[in-house]
């Protein structure tokens, strides 16, 4: 019996050993398996995030200087597409090309001017395009960075049939960089160069006097900065170390900068947006003790494009301003007051007839769509309000300053109240759309910070606005 049990155990051991060797070691046993087909992972390429182009303000200033030099050097004759120029143009175009190569996101629009009474023998639809294309061939830049366009002018030729300067070709850096186009930065830079050219001072003098030639450039810069509250102006004045400032440990260059800043503040520029500095130089004056050219430098200060939160804030402010600066209606009393004050300012009589200055009273009607608590915001306002809610939730320590502005017709006190009503109207709209009232502060600048000329009807329209400052 014992031998039989041992024999059975041996058989079981041999069977298990045989199965293990055959099925596990040699893997010769058949088994039903579910085979899963595993597809190779699909490689999804994420779109490359376009890097924001950062432009150094000094490089941008030099780029515009090259543009102005190039425009001044061009000339052509009536009914001819060929443009004549000097060696100075070649240098300027090389500088423009170098700037574009270093900033591939930036484009240059070249606008050629023409008149409808010119004979066009070119292969293009008009001589404006033909002239712009001629300039394109002189610029050694990638084609996609250059845009040729044309604009017709009523007249641009002198008695000899010659056109020159900016009557010939217009260069404009394009939309690839916001600050290049924002409310015509080109005109602002042109004003800046004129101001820099005409500003002078004298040895040991602390003042930079504002001459008549500087008035228009200063006015244009004031308007530009009032339109672009996220930008500023840098003022730098040279000095010689041997000069006497009459103040201990204070260089006279900084005193000049400060005194000129105060003059600009009196021209309605926010002092917080003016940055002053000075720079010592070996030679600043000529033999008459008058400052040499370029002894005073100005440049605009643009927002930091690497600060994503700040950029989002600026864009939100601008969108809200556009949505809120819509027509509103004056109540009867305000309308009557403004009519009376506008008549006294514009020289109209009580019955509405125009006086010697020729301004018709019906031009005043445009004001009656602005300035009160009956605001009519644009249809896309809720989108921007939602963005404002999210921004304030992300930045709980920030609030919103709403500032109302007016044109210059009427008494300053009346316009201050009118601007305040505009700001209050905007505040009511935002509160109605869900913004916490405690986050909203209102103020008025009245007529003191115009963004456009008040001498034109369109300028006065644009000056009646609401500004948003998230701070």
Image: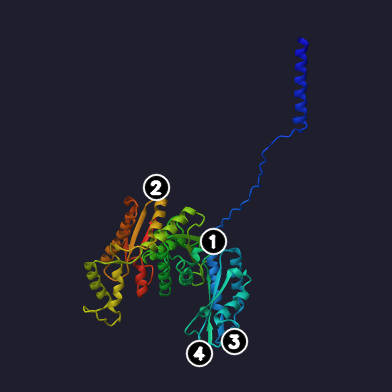
Asked whether, in this view, residue 225 is left or right of residue 141, the answer is: left
In this rendered view, identify the residue nearer to me: 180 or 242.
180
Query: In which quarter of the view is residue 119 placed?
Result: bottom right
Element under disc 4:
loop
> Which residue, given by chain and number where applicable, does mark 4 sit on?
159
Q: Is residue 401 above or below residue 40?
A: below
> Which residue, given by chain and number where applicable, does mark 2 sit on?
396
> Which residue, given by chain and number where applicable, does mark 1 sit on?
56
Give the numbered dot on residue 246.
none
Local packing at callout 4 (Cα closer than 10 Å; few below 14, some 14-19, many 20+) is few
The percent position of residue 424, horizontal first and vertical second, equals 30, 59
Q: Nearer the viewer, mark 4 or mark 2?
A: 2
Q: Nearer the viewer, mark 1 or mark 2?
A: 2
> Which residue, given by chain and number where applicable, does mark 3 sit on?
121
Mark 4 and mark 1: span between their CA atoms?
43 Å
Element under disc 2:
loop
Residue 313 shows in this picture: yes
Q: Earlier in the sequence, mark 3 or mark 1?
A: 1
Which quadrant is the N terminus positioned in?
top right
Q: Nearer the viewer, mark 3 or mark 1?
A: 3
Mark 1 and mark 2: span between their CA atoms?
32 Å
Indicate the colouring scheme: rainbow
The percent position of residue 394, horizontal first and vertical second, equals 43, 48
Q: Nearer the viewer, mark 3 or mark 4?
A: 3
Asked whether, in this view, residue 465 is left or right of residue 337, the answer is: right
Q: Earlier in the sequence, mark 4 or mark 2?
A: 4
Element under disc 3:
loop
């Amino acid at each position: 019996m014992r031998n039989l049990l041992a024999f059975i155990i041996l058989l079981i051991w041999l069977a298990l050993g045989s199965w293990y060797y055959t099925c596990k070691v040699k893997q010769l046993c058949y088994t039903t398996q579910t085979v899963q087909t595993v597809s190779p992972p699909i490689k999804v390429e994420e779109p490359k995030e376009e890097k924001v182009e950062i432009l150094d303000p000094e490089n941008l200033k030099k780029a515009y200087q090259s543009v102005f030099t190039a425009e001044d050097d061009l000339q052509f004759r009536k009914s001819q597409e060929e443009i004549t120029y000097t060696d100075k143009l070649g240098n300027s175009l090389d500088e423009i090309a170098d700037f574009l190569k270093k900033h591939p996101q930036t484009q240059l629009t070249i606008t050629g001017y023409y008149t409808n009474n010119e004979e066009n023998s070119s292969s293009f639809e008009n001589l404006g395009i033909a002239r712009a294309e001629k300039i394109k061939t002189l610029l050694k830049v990638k084609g996609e960075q250059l845009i040729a366009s044309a604009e017709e002018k009523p007249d641009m030729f002198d008695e000899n049939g010659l056109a020159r300067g900016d009557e010939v070709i217009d260069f404009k850096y394009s939309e690839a960089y916001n600050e290049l186009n924002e409310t015509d930065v080109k005109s602002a830079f042109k004003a800046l160069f004129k101001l820099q050219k005409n500003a002078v001072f004298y040895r040991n003098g602390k003042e930079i006097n504002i001459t008549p030639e500087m008035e228009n450039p200063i006015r244009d810069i004031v308007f530009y900065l009032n339109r672009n509250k996220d930008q500023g102006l840098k003022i730098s004045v040279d000095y010689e170390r041997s000069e006497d400032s009459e103040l201990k440990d204070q260089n006279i260059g900084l005193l000049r900068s400060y005194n000129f800043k105060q003059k600009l503040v009196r021209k309605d520029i926010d002092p917080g947006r003016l940055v002053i500095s000075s720079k010592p130089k070996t030679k600043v004056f000529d033999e008459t003790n008058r400052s040499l050219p370029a002894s005073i430098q100005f440049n605009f200060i643009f927002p930091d494009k690497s600060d994503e939160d700040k950029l989002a804030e600026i864009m939100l402010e601008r969108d809200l301003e556009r949505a809120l600066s819509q027509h509103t209606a004056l109540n009867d009393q305000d309308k009557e007051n403004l009519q009376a004050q506008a008549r006294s300012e514009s020289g109209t009589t009580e019955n509405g007839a125009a006086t010697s200055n020729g301004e018709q009273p019906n031009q005043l009607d445009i004001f009656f769509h602005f300035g009160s608590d009956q605001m009519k915001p644009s249809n896309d306002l809720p989108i921007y309000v939602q963005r404002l809610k999210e921004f304030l939730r992300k930045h709980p320590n920030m609030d919103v300053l709403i500032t109302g502005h007016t044109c210059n017709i009427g008494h300053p006190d009346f316009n201050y109240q009118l601007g305040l009503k505009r700001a209050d109207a905007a505040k009511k709209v935002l509160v109605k759309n869900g913004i916490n009232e405690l986050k909203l502060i209102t103020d008025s600048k009245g007529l003191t910070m115009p963004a456009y000329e008040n001498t034109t009807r369109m300028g006065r329209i644009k000056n009646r606005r609401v500004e948003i400052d998230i701070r």
